[in-house]
Image (spheres, grey):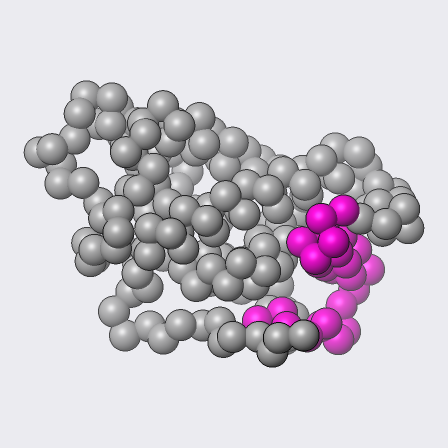
Amino acid sequence: MASDSALPPDDGRSGRLPPIPEERLTEAQRRVAAGISGGPRGGLRGPFPALLRSPDLADRFQKVGEYLRFNSSIPTALNELAILVTARSWSAQFEWYAHHLLAMKAGLPPAIAEAIAEGRRPEGMDDDQRIVYEFCTELHRSHAVSDATYAAARERFGEQGVVDLLGVSGYYVAVAMILNVAQVPLPPGVPEPLKPLPQG
C-alpha cells in the first residue's frame, strides 16, 4: 500500500489550525504525533496537525484511517477512486491533491480522475471502477444507495467490501471537513486542483 512518503513534507505554512510547535506539544500530543509519524503514513500531514488539538480523538481517528488506507478489503486503486469521489463532493482541495497523487501511483487511469474533478461521469471504466464510482457517487448525492447499486457492490466485493466502501467514504468526509475548516494549505506553487462545479 502507498504511504504518505509520496507527498511533499509539510512546509509549516499556517491555516486556521497550523502545526503546533514541538516545544508546545503536551505529553499526550507528543505520544499521538509519534504514533502517527511512526506508522505507515510516515509523517504528520493532512488533518492530523489540526486534530492534535484533541489528542484522544486524533489517536482514535488515525487508527480508523490506517485501516481504511492500508488494510481495506477494497483494492488500493479502487479505494483511492472512492476517496477522490469524496474529495470532489466536498471540493476538498488538499484531500484531492494528496489522494490524486496516491491514486495515480496505485494505477487509477488519469482520465477517470480528470472526469471526476470536472464533475463528469468517467468513460471507459471497467466493471470494478464503475461499481465503486456509482456506489460512492450515489451515496454522496442521495445519502443512500439504490437496491441495484447495493446489490452490484455486494456481489462484487461482499458485505465486508460494502462496509469498507461506506467506511472510507465517511472517514474521508470527516477528513474533508477538517481540511476545509482548518484551511490546510496546498504546497507552495500548487494551484487549486478542483474548479467550482456548475450549480443546478
Q: Residue furthest left?
A: 23
Above or below for 158 versus 107? above
Q: Where on the picture, by quarter, is residue 188?
A: bottom left
Q: Where on the picture, by quarter, is residue 140?
A: bottom right
Location of residue 34 in the rendering, given as x and y in whole percent from the top left corner: 27, 30
Q: Nearer the viewer, residue 17 or 121?
A: 17
Residue 103 appears anywhere in the view: no
Is 97 on the left-hand or right-hand side of 54? right
User: How many badges with numbers are in the image?
Assistant: 0
The reply to whether the magenta stretch includes residue 137 is: yes
Location of residue 27 in the rendering, given as x and y in whole percent from the top left corner: 19, 21
Name the residue at 68% across, 43% down.
165
Question: Which residues make up the magenta segment?
Answer: 116-144
Name the residue at 79% across, 55% down.
131
Above or below for 144 versus 120? above
Above or below for 182 versus 69? below
Residue 41 appears anywhere in the view: yes
Q: Nearer the viewer, residue 180 or 167?
A: 180
Location of residue 52 in the rendering, given as x and y in whole percent from the top left corner: 29, 34
Location of residue 110 in the rendering, given as x and y in whole percent from the top left corner: 59, 72
Q: Where on the picture, by quarter, is residue 77?
A: bottom right
The reply to whether the magenta stretch includes residue 11 is: no
Q: Nearer the viewer, residue 52 or 110?
A: 52
Above or below for 195 versus 186? below
Name the residue at 86% across, 49% down.
146
Q: Residue furthest front?
A: 200
Q: Main secondary structure of the magenta part?
A: helix
Is 47 on the left-hand or right-hand side of 74? left
